[in-house]
Amino acid sequence: MIPADIEVFVALDPVSLHKSFDTLAGEVQERVGRSPRTGGLFIFFNRRRTALKAIFADGTGLCIFYKRLDRGRFQLPEPIDEGRVVELSEDQLDVLLDGIELPPPRARAKRNTTPSVH
C-alpha cells in the first residue's frame, strides 16, 4: 500500500494522535511546507513515542497508518541540522516501523595526546 520509492519525513516534535486527515494534513503543511497530496509519507509521534501516525496520498485520496507498540518506544532519528523534520531512507523507515531500539552510540576512547617520554 505504501509505495517503495516514497519520500519519508518524520516530525521530531510530538503531536496529538487524536488528529485525523485534515488536521494532520495541516501539520504537514505547517512543518514541511507542502501538502501531503504532493507525495511523501509524513510521520508523527505521540509525546511518549509509543505510537505513531503516518499520512500519505495514494492517488485517490489520503491514507492514515497508525501503529502502537506493545512495549518500548520508537527511536527518533537524529536531526542533521536545526530542522524539526528529518527525511528517512526506506531502510531507516523499516527499522523505525519495526520499533527496533538502537543502542546508544558508544563514546570513543580518548586518545592520549600527551607525548610519551622514553
Image (tube, grey):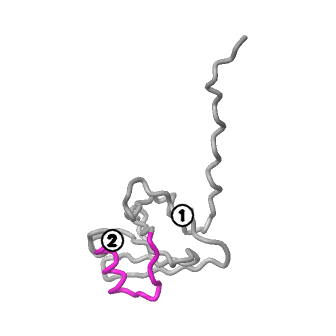
Task: Give coordinates of residue 91: x percent, y percent.
Answer: 51, 57
Residue 94: numbered disc: 1
In what element is the residue under mark 1? Answer: helix
> Image quarter for residue 33?
bottom left
The mark closer to the camera, 1 or 2, is 2
Seen from the viewer's position, the closer of residues 86 and 99 is 86
Instruction: Give neighbour class at mark 1: few <14, some 14-19, many 20+ (Cα, 10 Å).
Output: few
Residue reaching furthest to the top: 118
Residue numbers of the magenta segment:
13-31
Q: x, y (%) of residue 30? A: 29, 74
Q: Is 109 rendered above or below residue 65?
A: above
Depth check, front residue: 112 or 36 = 112
Which residue is denoted by mark 2 in the rendering?
Answer: 31
Residue 38 on image: x %, y %: 27, 71
* Residue with the most extreme right position: 118
Q: Is residue 108 left or right of residue 89?
A: right
